[in-house]
Image: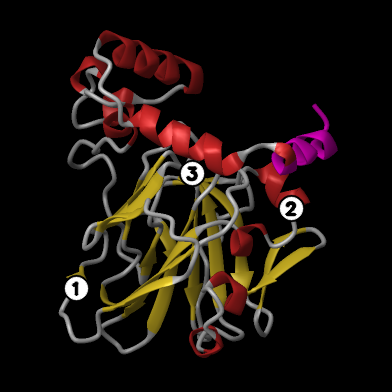
């Protein structure tokens, strides 16, 4: 299928209904059928179960519990760096934010204000800063960890579309990451600087969850929801789990203007691992 046809198909798909159905199926306890589906998924996508805390496919009562499986201790050592890669995945894009514009793909940009759900004051803090987009494929580990230590300030659930976030769609759907459903989390580092982590939903991503809130979506009320945490002490260490995708997607990170140097080994479309040096 050509890229143009693939994009057209994305527009025609009943994405919300498909996602709702996939979410229910992924949480169903179907015994041997669930195990068979998990085994087929492992074979189809080349999932490395040797890295899982429990490598036995039959040990997972639901597909979601398999999909959000924990890793064995020690398989993702943390490097010594200012910022660590928060996930396993592939680099979609990274680099400078040009005023308030983030590069998505050739011919496509989106604004930081749109990404964070319309909060211009929040977006202004990242003007001329840095961004990184990391895509999580079906075979990847789907828990999300902290790139650095941070205190949670706020979380925003932004309703939106549910386009696929694969590289083909990123090249063909304008403003993809700022139009899909997403969960925006803003943190404060020990030095007072802030940063944002955005969990972007996609087709058949049944839900997204954080360690402090649990499942954020569903529900999907169709309007922006916000939680404030400035008066609470929710602090997460560098490398600690902060959330997870229940059927994979993309993480977008925003950092304020400063002398940030990305890992020179990072290249667009290149694979990355949780815990490796992202920037210093």
Earlier along the polypeptide chain: callout 1 or callout 3? Answer: 3
Q: Is residue 87 left or right of residue 133?
A: left
Residue 259 picture location, percent across and down: 51, 83
Q: Which residue is mark 2?
A: 173
Q: Regarding mark 3 in the picture, which secondary structure is present there?
A: loop
Report the residue at 45% width, 32% height from top. 22
Q: Is residue 136 left or right of residue 231?
A: right
State whether residue 83 is above or below residue 162.
below
Numbered range of the magenta stretch: 1-11
Q: Please identify the quarter of the rendering in which residue 248 is found.
A: top left
Name the colouring of the figure: secondary structure
Residue 244 picture location, percent across and down: 33, 49
Report the residue at 37% width, 74% height from top. 226
Instruction: Kindly report the distance in space between the C-alpha atoms of the residues bearing marks 1 and 3.
Output: 25 Å
Q: Quadrant of the C terminus?
A: bottom left
Earlier along the polypeptide chain: callout 2 or callout 3? Answer: 3
Residue 267 in sight here:
yes
State whether residue 155 is above or below residue 145.
below
Q: Determine crowd level at label 3: few under 14, some 14-19, many 20+ residues with C-alpha closer than 10 A.
A: many
Q: Quadrant of the N terminus?
A: top right
Q: Which residue is mark 3?
A: 136
Q: Is residue 8 magenta?
A: yes
Q: Please identify the quarter of the rendering in which residue 113 is found.
A: bottom right
Characterize the magenta stretch by its predominant secondary structure.
Answer: helix
State the residue in front, 75 or 173: 173
Look at discs 1 and 2 and give the one toward the viewer: 2
Q: Regarding mark 1 in the picture, which secondary structure is present there?
A: strand
Residue 203 in sight here:
no
Instruction: Kindly report the distance in space between the C-alpha atoms of the residues bearing marks 2 and 3.
Output: 18 Å
The dot on residue 102 is none
Earlier along the polypeptide chain: callout 1 or callout 2? Answer: 2
């Amino acid at each position: 299928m050509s890229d143009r046809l693939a994009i057209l198909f994305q527009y025609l798909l009943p994405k919300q209904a498909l996602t709702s159905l996939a979410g229910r199926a992924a949480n169903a306890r179907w015994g041997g059928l669930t195990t068979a589906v998990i085994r087929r998924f492992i074979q189809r996508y080349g999932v490395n179960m040797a890295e899982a805390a429990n490598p036995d496919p039959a040990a997972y009562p639901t597909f979601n519990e398999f999909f959000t499986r924990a890793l064995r201790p020690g398989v993702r050592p943390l490097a010594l760096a200012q910022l660590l890669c928060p996930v396993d995945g592939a680099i979609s894009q990274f680099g400078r934010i040009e005023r308030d514009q983030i590069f998505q793909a050739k011919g496509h940009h989106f604004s930081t204000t749109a990404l964070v759900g319309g909060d211009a004051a929040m977006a202004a803090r990242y003007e001329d800063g840095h961004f990184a987009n990391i895509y999580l494929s079906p075979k990847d580990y789907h828990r999300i960890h902290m790139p650095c230590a941070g205190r949670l300030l706020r979380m925003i659930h932004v309703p939106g579309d549910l386009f696929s976030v694969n590289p083909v769609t990123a090249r063909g759907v304008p403003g993809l990451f700022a139009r899909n459903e997403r969960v925006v989390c803003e943190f404060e580092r020990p030095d007072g600087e802030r940063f944002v982590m955005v969990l972007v939903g996609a087709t058949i991503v049944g839900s997204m969850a954080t360690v402090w809130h649990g499942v954020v979506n569903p529900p999907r009320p169709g309007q922006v929801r916000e939680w404030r945490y400035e008066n609470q002490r929710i602090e997460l260490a560098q490398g600690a789990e902060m959330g997870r995708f229940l059927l994979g997607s993309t993480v977008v990170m925003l950092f304020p203007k400063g002398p940030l140097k990305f890992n020179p080994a990072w290249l667009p479309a290149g694979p990355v691992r949780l815990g490796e040096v992202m920037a210093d």
